[in-house]
Image: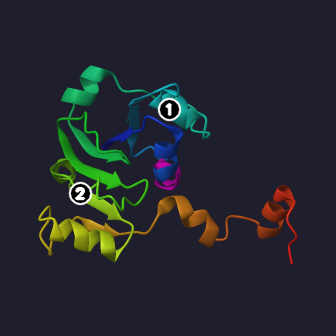
Amino acid sequence: MPELLFFCKAPMNAVMFERPLRRLWGDPRFNIHFTGEGRGHGSSAHIVRQLGFDGARQASTFAVRWKPWDAYISSDIQMPARRVRRAVQIFHGVSFKGKMFTPGIQRFTDLFLVGEDMRRRFIKHGLFPEDHPGLHKVGMPKLDAFFDGSLDRSMVLRDLGADPV
């Protein structure tokens, strides 16, 4: 059974992987754990439980570090897991200052990129070769709800007290 480890230290981190997690949640083929401790937010399991993932389990510090994980998914540069087959970075934003273009990003096998500019910049900074198979242009996951029809426009406008015209 694949062992998946999701990292979050703030609700914003969890929002970035919420949609893929919803697809995996409850699927008996996956064993899902969480790691990370938020400043004032509680454990990562506590954070994702607030999004409706009842039964979310916090991995022990020992397990995070030494257990062989099939996948590590994070929207943060931190990588507490040491034995990971695939490490996926889901960026929580776009840094115009270039903070994401650091050698630490090379610990990740897969980067979910916002777009082509981000890909070009990783290559320009010499962090990944142009033909790297782990550079995936997926867009900005936290904006998916604006475009996939899951938001009811009239309800949102009504809740905001805005004129729907």
- Position of residue 45 relative to residue 70, above or below, is above
- Residue that appears at 36% across and 62% down: 96
Of residues 40 and 86, which is closer to you in this image? Answer: 40
Marking on residue 56: 1
Q: Which residue is mark 2?
A: 101
Contact between labelled residues 2 and 1, with CB atoms less than 8 Å apart: no
Q: Quadrant of residue 124?
A: bottom left
Q: Main secondary structure of the magenta part?
A: helix
Which residue range is magenta in the image? 17-24
Q: Position of residue 142 (x, y in %)?
A: 53, 58
Q: Is residue 103 magenta?
A: no
Q: Is residue 22 magenta?
A: yes
**Tag 2's secondary structure?**
loop
Q: Position of residue 4 (x, y in %)?
A: 34, 42
Determine if residue 133 is in view: no
Q: Position of residue 25 (x, y in %)?
A: 50, 45
- Residue that appears at 57% across and 38% down: 53
- Residue that appears at 16% across and 65% down: 125
Quadrant into which the C terminus falls: bottom right
